[in-house]
Image (cartoon, rainbow, N blue to C red):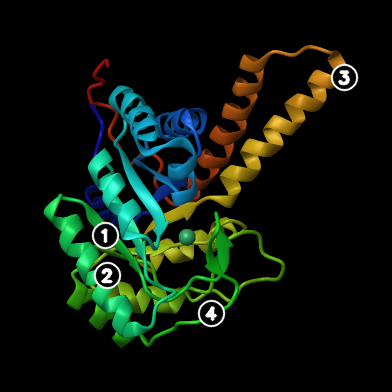
């Protein structure tokens, strides 16, 4: 089976100089399509869920869809919780089987962010779960979490000091990117990614990647980023594929849900495949991994 831990996948990518795509899935269909894209390109993959998706679909239903797909997969697949400011939800997904969580303390002032992050890390580590930490806010609102204003930002030294003191496993610093779609070109902090990846002996995570070019992704990967989140690009591919199919259905007066699912899966596979290639993750999993039937 290929149920894996996020931290193992990302540490391996960091050593080998590529980034693992971390895809915000929303349902069983997007889980399957994302894993199919990873299998076709021999890439590890992180499936991640927003708090909103956990609340809408339910932690147990999401975990069983993840487990069913990951067990059949020929590439390593892990499950991560994206931006979560609520320790209660973190506990719920730890109990359900997630292997890592992003504790988002970016809305808190530094002292409180340090204290709460430390408590979350203690609880998560006891369960063998890794913690991604965000104490600077990456601008933009994603599934109801976040703010359009940069309210907390720190020096590289402060970020590294807090990361070491709170014993976090992955760091999500502000790198000039934003959640959602860009209305003007972002000022990317590639040198900052490089400095932090040297100063801190832990994986660096890039958020807000939708809209960056292949060359920009490659620069971030070369700078030491080893997990890159994809959310908006999947949502767009999912909804635009659905819309195209439904417009065709109306024209032809043919209404077949399974064909709708096929078209959505195809749109999702294409967009995830493009990102896998940009991140240097294609062909990083040997094809000799045994496939275990579920
Ligand atoms: Zn994010």
Residue drawn at x 21%, y 71% as measured from the top left: 118
Which residue is disc 1 drawn over? 131
Indicate the position of residue 133 as horizontal and vertical percent values.
Answer: 32, 66
The mark that comes first in sequence, 4 or 1, is 1
Q: Are the residues tagged 3 and 4 within 8 Å (C-beta)? A: no
Which residue is disc 4 drawn over? 150
Mark 4–mark 2 Cα distance, whole angstroms, equals 19 Å
Mark 3–mark 2 Cα distance, whole angstroms, equals 53 Å
Mark 3–mark 4 Cα distance, whole angstroms, equals 46 Å
Indicate the position of residue 269 as horizontal and vertical percent values.
Answer: 54, 33
Residue drawn at x 27%, y 71% as measured from the top left: 116
Q: Nearer the viewer, residue 183 or 13?
A: 183
Residue 199 in view of the camera: no
Indicate the position of residue 144 as horizontal and vertical percent values.
Answer: 55, 58
**Mark 4 burial class by Cα count in 10 Å: few <14, some 14-19, many 20+:** some
Q: Under tag 4, what secondary structure? A: loop
Which residue is disc 3 drawn over? 251
Mark 2–mark 1 Cα distance, whole angstroms, equals 9 Å
Residue drawn at x 34%, y 28% as measured from the top left: 64
Q: Are the residues tagged 2 and 1 within 8 Å (C-beta)? A: yes
**Mark 1 burial class by Cα count in 10 Å: few <14, some 14-19, many 20+:** many
């Amino acid at each position: 089976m290929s149920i894996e831990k996020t931290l193992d996948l990302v540490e391996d990518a960091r050593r080998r100089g590529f980034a693992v795509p971390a895809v915000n899935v929303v349902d069983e269909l997007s889980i399957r399509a994302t894993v199919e894209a990873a299998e076709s390109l021999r890439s590890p993959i992180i499936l991640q869920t927003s708090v909103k998706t956990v609340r809408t679909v339910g932690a147990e239903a999401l975990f069983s869809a993840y487990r069913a797909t990951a067990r059949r997969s020929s590439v390593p697949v892990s499950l991560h919780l994206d931006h979560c400011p609520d320790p209660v939800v973190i506990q719920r997904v730890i109990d359900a089987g997630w292997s890592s969580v992003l504790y988002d303390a970016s809305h808190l002032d530094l002292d409180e962010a340090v204290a709460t992050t430390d408590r979350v890390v203690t609880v998560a580590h006891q369960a063998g779960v890794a913690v991604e930490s965000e104490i600077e806010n990456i601008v933009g609102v994603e599934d109801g979490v976040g703010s359009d204003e940069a309210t907390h930002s720190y020096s590289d030294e402060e970020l590294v000091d807090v990361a070491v003191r709170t014993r976090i496993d992955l760091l999500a610093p502000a790198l000039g990117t934003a959640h959602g779609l860009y209305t003007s070109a972002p000022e990317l902090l590639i040198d900052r990614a490089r400095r932090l990846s040297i100063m801190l002996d832990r994986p660096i995570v890039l958020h807000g990647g939708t809209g960056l070019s292949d060359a920009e992704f490659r620069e971030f990967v070369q700078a030491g980023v080893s997990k890159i989140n994809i959310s908006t690009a999947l949502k767009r591919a999912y909804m635009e594929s659905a819309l195209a199919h439904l417009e065709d259905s109306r024209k032809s007066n043919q209404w077949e849900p399974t064909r709708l699912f096929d078209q959505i899966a195809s749109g999702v596979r294409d967009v995830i495949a493009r990102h896998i290639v940009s991140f240097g993750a294609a062909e990083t999993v040997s094809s000799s991994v045994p496939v275990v039937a579920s």
